[in-house]
Image (cartoon, grey):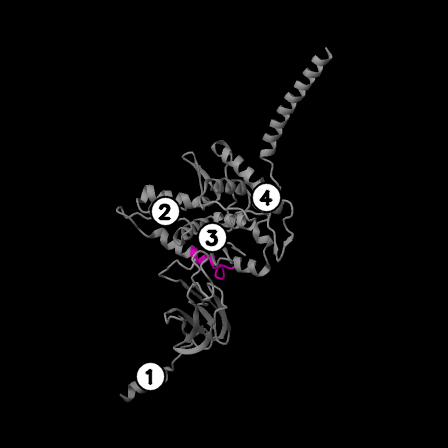
Amino acid sequence: MLINRIICFALFLIFSMNVSSEDTIDKNLYEKPYASNELKSGQYFSRKETRNMEIEEFENPGMIWVERGKELFDIEEGKNSNSCSSCHKQDVNSLLGAAATYPKVHNNKLINIEQKINMCRKNYMKVEEYKLESVNLLSLSSYIAYISKGVPMNVNVEGKAKKYFIKGKEMFYQRVGQMNLACNQCHDEIAGSYLRAERISQGHVNGFPAYLMRWESVASVHRRFQFCNNQARAKPLEIGHDDYNALQLYIAWRGNSLLLESPSVRR
Amino acid sequence: MASETRKNWRRRLKAPESAVKGEIITIKTMAEHIMEPGVRRDPETGIIYPKKIIDLVICRFNGKQIYKTHWFSGVSANPFMAFKMKAITSGLLEVEWIDDYGQSSYKKAVIIVYDENGKKVIPMKLDKINSVKEAI
């Protein structure tokens, strides 16, 4: 009898633990490291000179890319001589706030804004896709992000996007590389303190595509992720990889309600 | 990205459209350029990227040189430059960038200067022109 009772109790314990652990995972899944009033964009952590450079539009070198993107937006290409603006009329502002909702699920696949531009070129304009991380693609994406400057980030993580969101969250907390570092160790726990000469930011992506001074050009989020992985001495994935999109989705959701400020200037 | 070739390098110039005579105005310029210092190597092949920088910037006002700088390999990419000048007469401001391959590009802006009475200050004297016409 005693053994029976013990087994019963043990089973009950295991069962109850299982239930409770599932419950906590579901609750913890949407738990943000920062409350909405604690969110600080990367601008807050950068130096005064860098911040001034970003705020004044003429001094911001990222605006060169935006101007080029504005021209590319109107250039007609292909057999049907279509341009971006022949569908997205500029006066209607149909793209206002579009950049704040990416990455997004499209035909059961998570894509970011650069891949969406290429998709438009392939399906509607019937012309060659831009190479990822090429000047023209970054110009267009930074122009589209510039249109919705000041719009709060608002990515959707429910429904079809949930599995990508879980994958992204796993990647955020996974230790990688020889340094054995995970994203959260710097950007959640010690944000605001100094790493050599630079302050660690909270790691939001509301300023991307950003002008990065170390490369002297505008860079996408994925190139920045590659750099992060290189710093931890891990092998980086390719630009445009699905896992990077998932990670971008998690990070963008983490900073939901931050205002878009592309093209920002970072170091 | 030194291997990328771009045909139209962007030049930007910002100057006030109008000014009062005697006012000190700020002129801001920015040139899109890689400013390759000539010491960096390609990480894969080990080939040194050839030096390519803007080494001379000349500013002219009504055709007369007012400002000139020599740049060397320490200047960052997409160089930003600002300078101040005193507005005396209205006229045409030109900024010319010349790189070490001899390629030059320029950008221009018109500044109109008004005196205290609200009249335009014109860079030439009208009396002289009229007198020349009469003589002919």
Q: Residue A67 lies in magenta, yes or no?
A: no
The answer to whether residue A168 is left or right of residue A14 is left
Residues in magenta, as a range: A56-65
Using the numbered discs, state the Cα–Cα distance from disc 1 to disc 4 in whole angstroms: 77 Å
* Residue type (three-letter) at the residue carrying disc 2: Lys
Q: Nearer the viewer, residue A180 or A13?
A: A180
Label 2: which secondary element: loop
Q: Nearer the viewer, residue A231 or A76?
A: A231
Q: Earlier in the sequence, mark 4 or mark 2?
A: 2
Name the mark on residue A219. Answer: 3
Residue found 69% across the figure and 17% down from its top: A9
Kindly report which numbered mark, 1 or 3, lies closer to the viewer in this rendering. 3
Label 1: which secondary element: helix
Q: Which residue in the protein does label 2 denote?
A: A89
Q: Which residue in the protein does label 1 denote?
A: B129
Q: Work out which residue is located at the far bottom of the displayed protein and give it.
A: B135
Using the numbered discs, state the Cα–Cα distance from disc 2 to disc 3 in whole angstroms: 27 Å
Q: Quadrant of residue A35?
A: top right
Secondary structure character of the magenta stretch overall: loop
Q: Position of residue B54 (x, y in %)?
A: 43, 69
Q: Quadrant of residue B124?
A: bottom left
